[in-house]
């Protein structure tokens, strides 16, 4: 009897033990929840950064291909072709980087799936990146030339087709097109 009274006076009872265990489980559950949220945010930021890098690589390839259009290596100058200034969509489609799939309905659209060789984050995620060439007419007057185009990048991620980036293209970059 002496020992039972001493434990009750000096130790925890059953109610205090249940409360302390419940608090411990609550703290553990919240810590696991918040750490999983943190890892989820880190994963999403790495995924977005990798998609941006993949699109940057594609844009750099396109820039290089655009600057090599009509460049003559022997004379170290550009061939001035005025038809290029009026409609340069054929030049874009005929670029080395613009691979036309014979099974596609739209020759102005390119789609690729980046693999794990580009970034480890693409290993588990099925991501599809598309670039679409849109021909614009100045001020929506269709009788004018097709001298303005844009490339729109879209990313298919988690069953969502997200607009990612748009680039405007004009042939004046070589500065020989006169208006």
Image (cartoon, grey):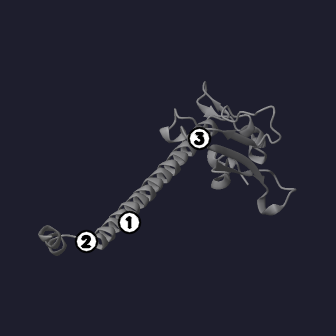
Which residue was labeled with disc 3?
58
On-image quarter of the N terminus: bottom left
Give whichever of 153, 156 is nearer the camera. Answer: 156
Which residue was labeled with disc 2?
13
Give whichever of 59, 49 is nearer the camera. Answer: 49
| CB within 8 Å, label 3 to label 1 | no
- The local secondary structure at tag 2 comes to loop
- The local secondary structure at tag 3 comes to helix
Residue at the extreme right: 143
Residue at the extreme front: 1
Tell me if mark 3 has few (under 14), some (14-19) or many (20+) residues whose alpha carbon lies within 10 angstroms of its own.
some
Which residue was labeled with disc 1?
26
Q: Is residue 177 above or below residue 34?
A: above
Residue 140's quadrant in the figure? bottom right
Q: Earlier in the sequence, mark 1 or mark 2?
A: 2
On-image quarter of the C terminus: bottom right
Q: Is residue 151 left or right of residue 25?
A: right
Residue 75's quadrant in the figure? top right
Residue 177 placement (x, y as % from top left): 70, 48
Q: Earlier in the sequence, mark 3 or mark 1?
A: 1
Residue 8 placement (x, y as % from top left): 19, 73
Q: Earlier in the sequence, mark 3 or mark 2?
A: 2
Residue 27 placement (x, y as % from top left): 35, 65
Q: Is residue 117 above or below residue 41?
A: above
């Amino acid at each position: 009897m002496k020992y039972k009274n001493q434990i009750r006076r000096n130790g925890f009872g059953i109610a205090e033990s249940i409360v302390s265990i419940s608090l411990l489980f609550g703290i553990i559950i919240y810590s696991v929840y918040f750490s999983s949220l943190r890892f989820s945010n880190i994963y999403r930021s790495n995924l977005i950064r990798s998609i941006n890098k993949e699109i940057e690589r594609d844009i750099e390839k396109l820039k290089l291909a655009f600057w090599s259009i009509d460049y003559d290596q022997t004379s170290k100058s550009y061939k001035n072709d005025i038809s290029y200034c009026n409609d340069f969509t054929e030049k874009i489609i005929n670029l080395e980087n613009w691979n036309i799939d014979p099974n596609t309905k739209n020759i102005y659209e390119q789609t690729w799936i980046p693999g794990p060789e580009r970034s480890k984050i693409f290993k588990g995620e099925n991501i599809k990146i598309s670039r679409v060439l849109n021909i614009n007419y100045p001020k929506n007057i269709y009788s004018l030339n097709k001298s303005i185009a844009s490339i729109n990048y879209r990313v298919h991620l988690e069953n969502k087709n997200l607009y990612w980036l748009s680039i405007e293209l004009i042939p004046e970059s070589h500065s020989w097109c006169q208006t």
